[in-house]
């Protein structure tokens, strides 16, 4: 939904689009703010970003054949 609003907000405006979609304008503005300012991310979101890097590293180091369980075990070491 956010990408749809991004594509069409210059023509229709954010608030009219949000009235038609089940999303509050404040939610849209919060997502946009988080894209530009990492400091606004929650601790969970920052941790998820860091973990994603580690998960990709483990997966790629093991020839992209490790499944969820093996990646999880590798991260626990």
Image (cartoon, rainbow, N blue to C red):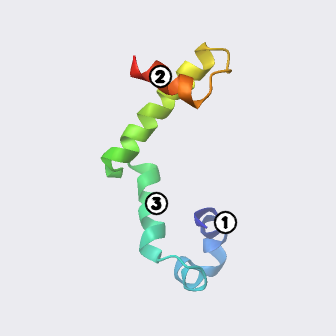
Q: Nearer the viewer, residue 70 or 43?
A: 70
Determine whether label 1 and label 2 are within 8 Å by CB: no
CA distance for labels 3 and 2: 33 Å
Q: Nearer the viewer, residue 67 or 49?
A: 67
Residue 56 place in picture, x, y as percent: 56, 26
- Report helix, strand or loop for mark 1: helix
Quadrant that contains the C terminus: top left
Q: Residue at x 47, y 22 (%)?
A: 73
**Residue 38 can be seen, yes or no:** no
Q: Residue at x 40, y 46 (%)?
A: 45
Instruction: Name the residue beneath numbered marker 1.
Output: 7
Residue 23 place in picture, x, y as percent: 52, 76
Q: Quadrant of residue 62?
A: top right
CA distance for labels 1 and 2: 41 Å
| Residue 32 in the image: above or below residue 19 | above
Instruction: Name the residue beneath numbered marker 3.
Output: 31
**Residue 67 can be seen, yes or no:** yes
Q: Within 10 angstroms of label 3, few (less than 14), some, or many (20 or more) residues?
A: few
Q: Is residue 32 left or right of residue 13?
A: left
- Report helix, strand or loop for mark 3: helix
């Amino acid at each position: 939904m956010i990408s749809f609003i991004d594509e069409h907000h210059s023509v229709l405006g954010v608030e009219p689009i949000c009235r038609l979609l089940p999303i509050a304008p404040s939610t849209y503005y919060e997502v946009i703010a988080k894209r530009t300012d990492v400091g606004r991310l929650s601790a969970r979101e920052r941790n998820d970003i860091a973990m994603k890097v580690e998960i990709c590293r483990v997966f790629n180091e093991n020839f992209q054949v490790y499944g969820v369980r093996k990646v999880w075990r590798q991260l626990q070491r």
